[in-house]
Image (tube, rainbow, N blue to C red):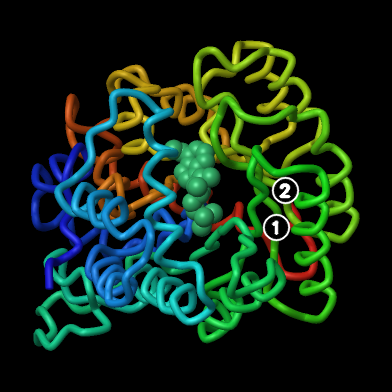
Amino acid sequence: HAEHTIAGPAAAALASLTPAQLHFLRALPKAELHAHLNGSIPLPALQDLANQYLQTEQEDSDAVRASIAQLQAGVTLNEIHEFFGLFPAIYALTSTPTALAQAARAVLAHFLLPRTSLLDPDPASSTKPSSPDGKFPEAAYLELRTTPRETSAMSRMKYVETVLDEVERYPADRAALIVSLDRRMSADVAAECVRCAVQLKEAGRRVVGIDLCGDVKAGDMTTFEAHFREAKAAGLGVTLHIAETEDTPVAEIHTLLSFNPDRLGHATFLDTPMRELVRSRKTCIEICLSSNLLCKTVPVLADHHVRWYLREDHPVAICTDDILPFRNSLLGEYALLMAAPPLGLGLTEAEVERVARMAMECRFRLGSRMES
Ligand code: 6MZ
């Protein structure tokens, strides 16, 4: 069993910390608010799913085998558009309720089960004794997000229920679900996803928000307005991936901001008036440092937009995005805040603590969006 190894900028930042700094970061309660289920499957779980899938001869076996080998070796992206090509192979592995439940269980365990050390990435199967400084989970709280998919084995409703069943194995103060709309969705499918989310929420299930994600070049965002209005009316939180790439049309950014989102994902290329608007509304920005560096939408940490938000004391949540392709961890993302430049931003413990608290305060609440 290969371990879910950490690599890249987050690993370098972690390796530069002192044991005391590491202990501080591990013990700090962190909220993971931006993690995509199918992008967050730990490697050992992906391997199990691939083995199961490849036991029966499938039409796309060779393509899936090649993609899984690539994910295991570690992917290098030349630009963000290559990122979305990683998902067909992963989706092949999570297209039955059983496999999807298994993937969700592994992701939840990865983030939420207490672990002994960094070298204990798979706490569910760990037999190692406790280290002297105790066990801490990656995240005190996880808002997992996923895009409902209809397959030959399940409806979109069944998809969401399957993931919710796993989320709800954890207490309400530890895990909740955000339903993602993909920019490529037709109006009918997007409406169906919102309907699922609203119905499940009304039935007392733990759906707390709606997200907009997917290939940054796809779709016409004006067609999504009604879906987000409906979600808000039902008391769901709204978070939108916005301005991930430099060529995002300004009109699209204005359209998305007009939906009055509670949180924004990435928000990498907002111009000054847009930032001012976001600041006046106190909209939380979900920041994914490794993701931005590895997708090459931000060249170096020194140029990262998080610096502006931190200077302005604006709410941000530090998140992982997709630990499978990016080989990062929530601890590693916080290490990027703390490590001395150029490996990190060089924040003090007090500053990092404040950032962690902001993320906890930006959680979507069950029942309605959090009161600010
Ligand atoms: C935009 C992203 C993303 O929903 O199938 N996704 N969308 N930008 C990103 N940053 C690099 N990372 C992940 O999880 C996988 C899906 O999440 C979206 C993509 O649509 C991807 O297919 P789920 O569980």
**Residue at mark 1:** 209
Percent across and percent down for residue 173 are: 57, 75
Q: Which amino acid does label 1 sit on?
A: Gly
- How busy is the neighbourhood of tag 2: few (under 14 within 10 Å), some, or many (20 plus)? many
Alpha carbon distance from label 2 to label 1? 6 Å
Q: Tell me what residue is drawn at x 30 percent, y 18 percent.
A: 299
- Say which label, 2 or 1, has the lower sequence index: 1
Pointers 2 and 1 in contact (C-beta within 8 Å): yes
> Is the distance from the Cβ of mark 1 to the nearest ligand 1 atom less than 8 Å?
no
Residue drawn at (12%, 88%) of the image: 127
Quadrant containing the N terminus in the rendered view: bottom left
Q: Residues within 10 Å of mark 1 (few under 14, many from 20)?
A: many
Badge 2 residue CB within 8 Å of ligand 1:
no
What kind of element bears circle 1? strand
How many numbered discs sit on the rendered protein? 2
Determine which of the numbered discs, if any, sits on residue 238 in the image: 2
Residue 140 sits in quarter:
bottom left
Q: Position of residue 201 (x, y in %)?
A: 78, 72
